[in-house]
Amino acid sequence: MPEKPGLLIVDDDPEVLKSLQIWLKSEGFRVFTAGDTPQALDTIRKQEIAVGLVDLHLKNEDGLRLATELKALDESLKIIVITGYPSYESAIDAMKTGIFDYISKSTENDVILRKLRAAVAERQRERSGEKESGRPGINVILLGHHQLVREGLENFFKENAEYRLLHVYHSYEYVKKGDFNLEAALLLICSSCNQEYLDDAEGFFARLKLVFPNAKPVIINCACDDERKKELLRRGVKGFLPANIGKGVLKKALGCIMGGQVWVSRELSQQLLSELLEDTGSGIAYKKPVDSFNLSDREVEVLKALASGLSNLVISEKLFLSEKTVKTHTHNIFRKMGVKTRTQAVLKGMEFHII
């Protein structure tokens, strides 16, 4: 019987450690816990640990620094950083340290468990020398439930090993914030399965960007007219694939999209080029939005802090302001951007490349 994989949980909250230990022990892990850096390093030196689940914000300590120290002791150790305050900045910083994944504490248990098991499997492949050679695999997310579309894509992925189907969602409705994933490179969106959400294209793609920030969106099973496609291109879509696309054309299309190109028909391409030549200020296709809200430098700082999920009190301490001043800046941000909530402000800030 194979040995259970070792799991080290590092968190300064004893109740969190206890609950995670009980749960994950029942899921087949040998669970070790640590409340600070010395305890964590000592455990790695003495035990065979496959995965470290490390809190990003330890009391008086930096979770990312600890992750680096743990990796220095065991290069094959897989680190998953977990935080109650996820943000893009901390996620990017975390991925730069070479960690395996980054998740929110609000992530559902089945998702956390899936990521832990994936980390164990990845470590086993690396240590046994079975890791595939060549370029890294291209991770794909599918939003759609049509059986024929799913079967066709699954057969395509079996024949083209460089593509990996990470997850299938029945539709956009089933995507949760806790599914945050930096590894997804392609987001295949079935137009008929998500039609009601595509009607609000601006909000739809902005919210998907929050969950899959590095994924290129592609519309599949597409029967849109050219005017609709132009609108979707403005929202960041990188290509349109019909329902009856052949495997050879599909491979070529995805290769072009991953290479930084846009996959559209020759006719639409000519239309876009003609419009661009006629009026370079029309805003079609690839025009980069600008900050037209006249936010001050301090208001931009506050907006970025809002995007990190920080409370007004924490923002005031971080920016050396009074809590009342933070509330005033937040009110001004809402007024200038024409929004009513933090979420709306953050989504609009991302759309216009302010944050």
Image: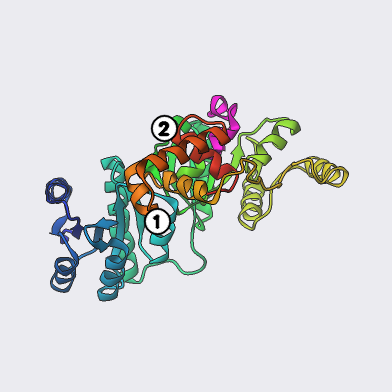
Q: Is residue 257 left or right of residue 83?
A: right
Element under disc 2: helix
Q: CA distance from mark 1 to mark 2?
A: 25 Å
- Taking depth in this image into account, of 194 and 103 the one nearest to the observer is 103
Residue 201: quarter of image: top right
352 relative to 162, above or below: above
Quadrant of the frame with the N terminus: bottom left
Residue, disc 1: 90
Q: Is residue 252 magenta?
A: no
Residue, disc 2: 174
Nearer to us of marks 1 and 2 is 1
- Taking depth in this image into account, of 177 and 323 the one nearest to the observer is 323
Question: Callout 1: few (<14), some (14-19), or many (20+) C-alpha neighbours within 10 Å?
Answer: some
- Taking depth in this image into account, of 313 and 62 the one nearest to the observer is 313
172 relative to 15, above or below: above
Residue 2: quarter of image: bottom left
Element under disc 1: helix
Q: Amino acid at mark 1?
A: Ser
* Res 78 label: none
Instruction: Give the residue displayed 27% in from the left and 56% down from the top.
Output: 57
Question: Callout 2: few (<14), some (14-19), or many (20+) C-alpha neighbours within 10 Å?
Answer: few
Query: What segment carries the magenta color?
Result: 189-206
Residue 313 image offset from top left, x and y in percent: 32, 44
The answer to which of marks 1 and 2 sits earlier in the sequence is: 1
